[in-house]
Amino acid sequence: MLSEPLIIAVAPGIALALIAYLTDWHDREPVRLLLMLFAIGFIAVIPTAIIEQTLLVFNPFTGLLSIAFIAFLVAGLTEELVKRKVVTRFALYRPEFNEKLDGIIYSVFVALGFATAENIEYVVFAFASNPYVGIYRGVVSVPAHMLFAITMGYYISLSKFSTEQGLKSAYLRKALTVPALLHGIFDFILMSQMDIVLLAFIPFILYLWVANMKKLNSYYKDSKNNHHLR
């Protein structure tokens, strides 16, 4: 029987993945492909942790600069780089990737697999005695990974369907730099433990939701229109 901490750890990622799957109403992706991407994202936590631990050794800073180094480079850039690599390696050139919404769906499944593994690490092992960690991460951290992924998938799709090589490369770079920046800001606010910085957390979360729901909605409408034209 599954333990309660494990259920708390895996439930948010699975629930959000199911919602993402149902969002792709007009041209759903193969379940096998989505499960594969979720699983690879889950496994990708291992090499990511190795890279992060290595980078921490070379952190030359103290104070807020040290926190910025960890938030933006160790966590933000490294984790989003690994996630983007999974999407481009295992989904970008598949024939099933035939509309812009697909880029978001693939990125979200990779990110939620990653977030679920990370959640198990925190909720089941590191903070098993503190039930509030699981609640907080389920409400804030796991959805944040999904929102970073929507941004990533948005730009991956712009790259995929652009006919100009220069734009393809530029959008693919943005598929890393923009979510990495958002991820870094998210972590920096929380890690700073400064009241004046923490005041920005709720507005930043609201911005993430509003901006990314707009991106998702624009590709949803594009999928709907494409379906009606077929």
Image (spheres, grey):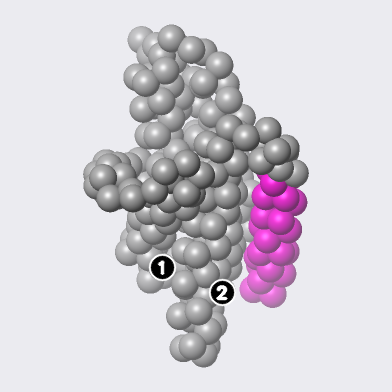
Percent coordinates x, y for residue 116 in the rendering: 43, 34
Q: Which residue is mark 1?
A: 92
Secondary structure mostly seen in the magenta stretch: helix
Q: Which residue is mark 2?
A: 158
Residue at 41% from the left image edge and 54% from the top image edge: 73
Percent coordinates x, y for residue 78 in the rendering: 37, 53
Q: Secondary structure at mark 1?
A: loop
Q: Quadrant of the N terminus?
A: top left
Q: Which mark is residue 201?
A: none
Residue at 42% from the left image edge and 18% from the top image edge: 127
**Segment colored magenta:** 204-230
Residue at 43% from the left image edge and 30% from the top image edge: 119
Percent coordinates x, y for residue 122 in the rendering: 41, 25
To which quarter of the image does residue 86 belong?
bottom left
Label 2 – label 1 distance at C-alpha: 12 Å
Percent coordinates x, y for residue 108 in the rendering: 51, 50
Q: Is residue 31 visible?
A: no
